[in-house]
Image: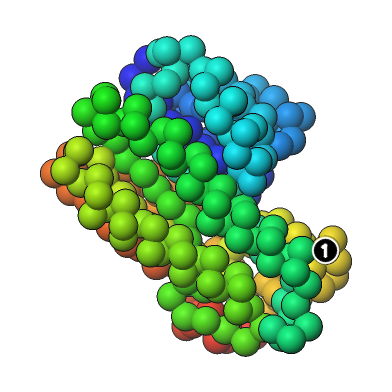
Amino acid sequence: MKKIALVTGASSGIGRATALAFAQKGIALILCGRREDRLLELQKEIDVESVILLFDVRDRDSVNAAIASLDDQWKKIDILVNNAGNAHGLSSFDKGEVDDWDNMIDGNVKGLLYVSRQVVPEMIANGGGHIVNLSSVAGKQTYENGAVYCASKKSVEAISEGMRLDLTKHGIKVTNIAPGAVETEFSEVRFKGDKDRAKQVYAGFDPLHAADIADAITYCIMAPDHVTIADMTIYAKAQAAPTVIYRK
């Protein structure tokens, strides 16, 4: 195998698009997620060596067991894409549901940490690697009714900075990607399956697509060895800030 990439949340959205983009570059893939049927479908679409790991990033024991189960050749991970995450609910702080808060902190922050903690020591032993963390424009600017989601993504930004400070000496690049409005299952999950409300988020303008973010991630990981793209913010043309979108 050439390079090996582990992608979390590969069953849909940005994770799936990133796996497809990496496959076009001949990168072997460790496809991680909770939905085995979708991962099997993805595996059929790619023409590179791949393995599937089933786990929820919020479950530390499951993360540890899954990554430990990899054969020695697959543990030599060159690229880690911490994509798995979620948004649950959109309400003022005083009306926020604690279960939603737990889901966002556990998935967006702790899950990223659990996966990274298992992969990074192997990268150090192998002499280098590249970590791509998916933040959000919500990590750049807090917006009304999104305090905890924004806090979780600000945490990703801080973790990315801290990783870079700690790991550059080991030859490990760290890239933080902060997408704006990307039309995926994101809003449907946030609004608890309310598809009509989710569609309104992307109405009246041309939003970003998962493939746009995958292209940006691919650009970063294909940069020359002496180049680190530390941070990238990506908006749709019609979007000027997290909650400022010019609609037709």
Q: Residue furthest left?
A: 226
Secondary structure found at label 1 = loop
- Picture residue at 69% right of the left edge, 61% below the top: 102
Q: How many marks do you count on the picture?
A: 1
Residue that mark 1 sits on: 192
- Quadrant (top left, top right, bottom left, bottom right) of the C terminus: bottom right
Q: Residue 10: give x, y in percent of width and height.
A: 60, 39
Q: Is residue 20 left or right of residue 199?
A: left
Q: Residues within 10 Å of mark 1 (few under 14, many from 20)?
A: few
- Quadrant (top left, top right, bottom left, bottom right) of the N terminus: top left
- Picture residue at 57% right of the left edge, 56% below the top: 108
Does residue 198 show up? no
Does residue 140 show up? yes
Q: Residue 61: give x, y in percent of width and height.
A: 62, 33
- Picture residue at 42% right of the left edge, 13% below the top: 72
- Picture residue at 43% right of the left edge, 75% below the top: 140
Q: Image height check: is 228 above or below 90?
A: above
Q: Is residue 44 left or right of residue 171?
A: right
